[in-house]
Image: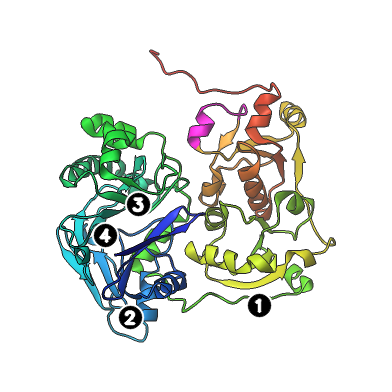
Amino acid sequence: MFMRMVYDEKLAQAAYVIGCQKTGEALVIDPERDVDRYIDLAEANGLRLIATAETHIHADFLSGSRELAERTGAKVYLSDEGDADWKYQWLNKKAGGGTYNHQLLKDSDTFNVGNIEFKVLHTPGHTPEHIVFLITDHGAGADAPIGMATGDFVFVGDLGRPDLLESAAGQTGAMEPSARRLFQTVRTLDDVPDFVQVWPAHGAGSACGKALGAVPMSTIGYEKRFNPAIRAAKDEQRFVDFILAGQPEPPVYFANMKRDNKLGPKVLGGLPTPLRLTVDRLKALDPQQVAIVDTRPWDQFRAGHVAGSLSLPMIKSFNTDSGSLVKDTEDVYLVIEPERLEEAIRDLIRVGLDRIVGWLPSSELGSTELVSILEIEPAEARAKLAEGMADPLDVRRATEFAEGHVPRAVNIAHTRLMGRMDEVPTGKPLIVNCRSGVRSARACAYLQRAGREVINLKGGFLAWEASGADVQHPEPSLGK
């Protein structure tokens, strides 16, 4: 048996290429859209990808199963659990007409790729249709599974969050019932041997949980003993309270990913090939009609950038920030160094930003006809706020904000700004903060593009606290 994890560090997403070395056949579980990586990996190891499978309708990235089926003819294995709202709707929409070779899966179903058996377990809670795969290598004579591709059910140190149907997909009232369903699903693990390895779909940094571990894999037995979420599942109400508490706000683009993975991601046929622009052509663009994504470091961006540009450096949060601050209906133009162009294109298509039209080497931007963003120290910010010359905006997560914040600050997570602009204070310049000044920089550029006057708080809330400035804390609850 062959198994390799293909990991996306930025989205903390794991796909798995699993193959039978005796027959030369392989499958990929939970692929992203740039499927050439999986095809090349299989070929380099003497395997041919004949199938693709998914654990559920993902919210944090666009699936590559449809792309792979178009490109290679791979058979598609998808869940047929959940109600009518959670059925895949693209299987009969093959490019050029027809239906994809596919099999819809129910609890306890099995299928084989060569001598490798995949057994389906229905594991609802994160989503209603969620399934996992128990994987047994019959070619090696095994009569028990070696691993479980757990998707967003079991992570190392956590369970998949059950609130996304409500917080991301907008299904009011779905959060608590989903948590109670997840509580029941945890009992599924009682029938899985402790030695079975846990192969999760995400690692530390993913927004699909709140406390994912940095170790890539685990075992069922270890997670039963030490996973805090599983340990909380001794009592239903305790579990519900635990699993729903402290979940971060999901990025606004998660709703689009759910929609598109259900209806069918657009077939790309390969990576987009944007045109190289001149600096004059870039500066002539209307930034209200297109998204100019400037990937230079913040200090360079704030010192001078094309008016209306977004500051989205090529750091670990690039995908999430881009998906949150760029609409999937906008043409995208990149200011970027040539050696990172392909990386950026892959990152963008993974979150549904396909309309990548042009790019300019950042070294050719020049210094004329540029605008800047002011960044100030806490002492100056305190003075402006005290004199009523500005309003504070905090773009941290709600859980961070609740631990203490700049007095009078309005809190909107930077990944949710697109859908909450009507809550942003008006009439005065905004002093924007996050924890250390990174997320607030993204928010400042977004707000400036929207026509707001913004100032970034240098060093963020950490610097504000260290300066001895007043910190507002939540009012204590009555009776406590």
Q: Determine which of the numbered discs, if any, sits on residue 200 in the image.
A: 3
Magenta segment:
398-408
Dot 4, crowdedness within 10 Å: few (<14), some or many (≥20)? few
Where is mark 2, residue-wise? 73
Query: What is the residue that sits farthest to the right in this orientation?
Result: 368
Q: Residue at x 36, y 73 (%)?
A: 66
For marks 3 and 2, the one nearer the N-term is 2
Q: Residue at x 27, y 80 (%)?
A: 99
Separation of marks 1 and 2 at Cα, in angstroms: 31 Å
Q: Determine which of the numbered discs, if any, sits on residue 85 in the image.
A: 4
Label 4 sits on what residue type? Asp
Where is mark 1, residue-wise? 275
Quick one: SS at disc 3?
strand
Separation of marks 3 and 2 at Cα, in angstroms: 26 Å
For marks 4 and 2, the one nearer the N-term is 2
Rendering coords of residue 395 (x, y %): 58, 40
Q: Of circles 4 and 1, which is in front? A: 1
Separation of marks 1 and 3 at Cα, in angstroms: 38 Å
Q: Of circles 1 and 2, which is in front? A: 2
